[in-house]
Amino acid sequence: MKYSILLLALVGSIAMSACDRQAVPVAVPVAVPGPAGATGATGATGAVTPTGATGATGATGTTGATGTEGAGGATGATGATGSAGGEGAKGDTGDTGKTGSTVVVVPKQ
């Protein structure tokens, strides 16, 4: 009995595969365009739109920041040497010294 079921399944599967049909391609007609029609009439000109109003003037901007202090200038060139001065006035002649004793100062020890 177990061989009969196995044999029946084998014969059934072979019979089913024998009935399998091949797919036949179907020809699809391709649309071919006809001749071109006449050109259409020119369209009407579009309406003119009026110009819009001018916008208001913008607000004044803020003042910019103060700039940094510039670098110091270079030292100037040395001036020319002045001309020699004139001779000074002569002083008065000194008084004659007094006659007397000589004083000697001795340092403290």
Image (cartoon, helix red, strand yellow):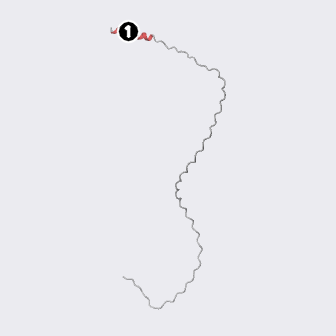
Q: Position of residue 76 (x, y in %)?
A: 56, 65
22 left or right of 106? right
Amino acid at pointer 1? Leu
Query: Toward the viewer: 90 or 52?
Result: 52
Q: Position of residue 87 (x, y in %)?
A: 58, 79
Query: Toward the viewer: 15 or 3?
Result: 15
Residue displayed at 38% across by 9% down: 8
Q: Considering only vertical position in the picture, is 43 above or below 106?
A: above
Residue 29 quadrant: top right
Residue displayed at 40% across by 10% down: 12
Query: Toward the viewer: 64 or 31?
Result: 64
Q: Quadrant of the C terminus?
A: bottom left
Q: Position of residue 62 (x, y in %)?
A: 53, 52
Q: Position of residue 101 (x, y in %)?
A: 44, 90
The 10 Å Cα crowd at callout 1, few under 14, some 14 to 19, many 20 or more, is few
Residue 82 quadrant: bottom right
Mark 1 residue element:
helix
Residue displayed at 34% across by 9% down: 3
Would you name the residue on which mark 1 appears? Answer: 8
Q: Quadrant of the N terminus?
A: top left
